[in-house]
Image (tube, rainbow, N blue to C red):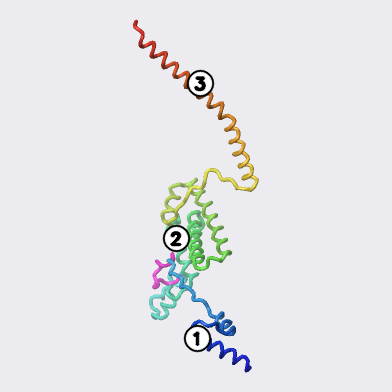
């Protein structure tokens, strides 16, 4: 115990001498200091346009909702709602924009709207938690499913496809006309083909040069013959 006090006293005395080495006990204690975390920037959400005074989905059509107290109304509004309840209301709003009839709950447009709400929710979550691989995988699966639905809708009903993309603010990009999986075998084969092509091109370079010279000589001879014919009197 006495040795510990002596070492600490020497370390504290060393720190006051302008840059002297401090005690190893103090160095160890300094390692436990937590680094300053950067504040996350405010990420815009697709739920920002929902007013906080809007009632939740389960209480919007209750007849006595207008006669309740203000405190109860705040508890039943989106001001106290969870993220899941807000996403439900946002999904319902997107579905109302593209559905064919009031009873339409399973058409392609409705499925695209529901997938769009889920994808945007995943995107906001991944901006805050970029290492969440499970939700990233789910988002990519939903994006692929939405692409297939939009491609089918574009092929069958193009006017509905345009209206759906416009109402949901979706930028659809056409897939490439031909796609091939790049493998190691394909790369080696392509490199070999390029090498063979260059060697054949070098071998035929002399022959092409000879043919070019002969062609130029024939053109020059034809021009000289024509000039002689034009210069001779009739």
Q: Is label 2 or label 3 in front? A: 3
Element assignment for label 1 = loop
Q: Residue at x 56, y 64 (%)?
A: 135
Marks 1 and 2 sit apart, C-alpha to C-alpha, by: 69 Å
Q: Residue at x 47, y 73 (%)?
A: 38
Q: Report which residue position mark 1 lands on.
A: 17
- Please state which of residues 21 and 195 is positioned toward the viewer in this rendering: 21
Q: On the image, which quarter does residue 227 sit in?
A: top left
Q: Report which residue position mark 3 lands on.
A: 214
- Please state which of residues 38 and 1 is positioned toward the viewer in this rendering: 1
Q: Name which of mark 1 and mark 2 comes first in the sequence.
A: 1
In the rendered image, the vertical position of residue 124 relative to residue 233, given as above or below: below
Marks 3 and 1 sit apart, C-alpha to C-alpha, by: 93 Å
State if disc 2 and disc 1 touch (CB < 8 Å): no
Q: Is label 1 or label 2 in front? A: 1
- Residue 91 numbered mark, or none: none
Q: Quadrant of the C terminus?
A: top left
Magenta span: predominant SS is loop
- Which segment is the magenta one? 45-56
Q: Quadrant of the N terminus?
A: bottom right
Element assignment for label 2 = helix
Q: Report which residue position mark 2 lands on.
A: 94
The tally of labels here is 3
- Place of residue 228 in the rendered image (x, y in percent of width and height, measured from the top left): 39, 12
- Place of residue 218 in the rendered image (x, y in percent of width and height, measured from the top left): 47, 18
């Amino acid at each position: 115990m006495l040795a510990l006090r002596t070492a600490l006293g020497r370390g504290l005395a060393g720190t006051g001498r302008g840059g002297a080495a401090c005690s190893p006990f103090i160095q160890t204690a300094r390692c436990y200091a937590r680094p300053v975390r950067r504040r996350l920037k405010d990420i815009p959400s697709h739920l920002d346009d929902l007013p906080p005074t809007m009632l939740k989905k389960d209480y919007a059509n209750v007849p006595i909702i207008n006669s309740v107290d203000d405190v109860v109304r705040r508890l039943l509004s989106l001001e106290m709602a969870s993220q899941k309840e807000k996403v439900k209301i946002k999904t319902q709003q997107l579905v109302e924009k593209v559905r064919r009839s009031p009873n339409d709950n399973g058409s392609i447009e409705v499925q695209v709207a529901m997938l769009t709400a889920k994808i945007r929710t995943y995107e906001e979550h991944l901006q805050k938690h970029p290492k969440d691989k499970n939700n990233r995988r789910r988002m990519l699966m939903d994006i692929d499913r939405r692409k297939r639905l939009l491609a089918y809708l574009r092929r069958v009903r193009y006017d509905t496809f345009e209206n759906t993309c416009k109402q949901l603010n979706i930028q659809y990009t056409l897939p490439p006309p031909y796609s091939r999986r790049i493998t190691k075998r394909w790369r080696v084969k392509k490199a070999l083909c390029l090498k063979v092509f260059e060697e054949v091109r070098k071998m035929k370079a002399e022959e092409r040069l000879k043919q070019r010279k002969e062609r130029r000589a024939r053109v020059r001879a034809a021009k000289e013959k024509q000039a002689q014919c034009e210069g001779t009197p009739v």
